[in-house]
Image (cartoon, helix red, strand yellow):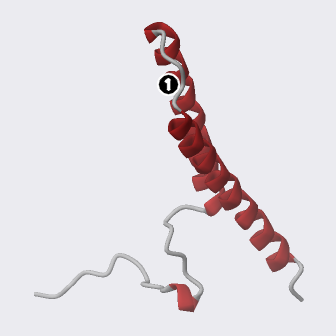
Amino acid sequence: MGTKMYGPMTSPGDGGSLIPLPARVLGVVTVGLAVVSLTAYGVYCSLAGDSMNTTVLQLVAGTVALGLVLVAWDELTDFFESSRP
């Protein structure tokens, strides 16, 4: 029995990425999920009559920041690759 190869195996040292999606897509999805989660949490708090927890707001802010960093990373990578001679 042999093993099947479904595609070339690359490692980050070979120019491959550990993330199977482009960083821009992953960043936009991360920010979108954070916004949806915060909206749902806000609706829950308003219906339950509770105040929003500071820890939850800090986690959402950190997740949004991570998404923005991923988008910026991909944009900068594209910029520097296109300016390479």
Position of residue 25 measured from the top left corner of the image (x, y, whole percent): 61, 53
Question: Which quadrant of the view contains residue 85?
Answer: bottom right
Q: Nearer the viewer, residue 85 or 41?
A: 41
Q: Indicate the position of residue 74 as horizontal and vertical percent values.
A: 71, 65
Residue 52 is situated, as x and y percent measured from the top left of the image, at: 54, 25
**Is residue 45 depicted above or below 68 in this figure?**
above
Q: Secondary structure at mark 1?
A: helix
Q: Amino acid at mark 1?
A: Tyr
* Residue at image point 48% right, 86% down: 11
Q: Dot 1, how many residues are within 10 Å of its Cα: few (below 14), some (14-19), or many (20+)?
A: some
Q: Is residue 29 visible?
A: no
Q: Is residue 67 above or below residue 72?
A: above
Does 31 sit above or below residue 3? Answer: above
Residue ID for mark 1: 41
Can residue 85 be seen from the camera position used here?
yes
Tell me the quarter of the picture where residue 77 sits.
Answer: bottom right
| Nearer to me, 33 or 58 | 58
Tally of marks: 1
Q: Position of residue 80 (x, y in %)?
A: 83, 77
Quarter holding the N terminus is: bottom left
